[in-house]
Image (cartoon, helix red, strand yellow):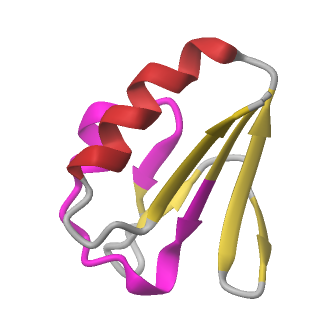
Amino acid sequence: MVIITLQRAKCIGCNYCVELAPAQFQMSKKDGKSVLLHSKEKKGFFTLKSSDYTIFDDSIKAKEACPVKIIGIKQT
């Protein structure tokens, strides 16, 4: 299982996550912040749980590129 989390409120809209992991992230046209696709929100954290391990590498690249460090990735 791959678990991705995003603290969307802290996003500065740099677009790195979308460029590196477009299958998981896109930019909101409303406020210019990142959206973690197919995620569920709880207390400001958006979480995606996926059994598709192919998303892990791109998601790690997005996490490392994020200048405000609001993306978390776990593999179980």
User: Considering only vertical position in the picture, is 56 above or below 72?
Assistant: above
> Is residue 8 placed above or below 53 in the rendered structure?
below
| Residue 36 against residue 46 in the figure, above or below | above
Is 69 placed left or right of 48 in the picture?
A: left
Magenta-drawn stretch contains 28:
no
Q: Can you give x and y, in whole percent of width and height, for residue 67 in the image?
A: 19, 65
Q: Residue at x 48, y 86 (%)?
A: 9
Q: Residue at x 37, y 72 (%)?
A: 33
Q: Number of labelled discs?
A: 0
Image location (x, y in percent) of residue 42: 81, 78
User: Which stretch appears magenta?
Assistant: 5-26
12, 73: nearer the viewer: 73
Q: Quadrant of residue 75?
A: top right
Residue 24 shows up from this direction:
yes
At 40% from the left edge and 84% from the top edge, which residue is drawn? 10
At a point 31% along the width and 34% down the height, the residue shown is: 61
Which quarter shows the C terminus?
top right
Nearest the camera: 4 or 30? 4
Q: Is residue 39 left or right of residue 63?
A: right
State whether residue 55 is above or below residue 71: above
User: Is 75 displayed left or right of 36 in the figure?
Assistant: right
The answer to if 17 sits in the magenta stretch is: yes
Q: What is the quadrant of the N terminus in the image?
A: top right
Residue 42 left/right relative to 60:
right
Give the image location of residue 6, x and y in percent.
55, 64
Q: Is residue 22 visible?
A: no
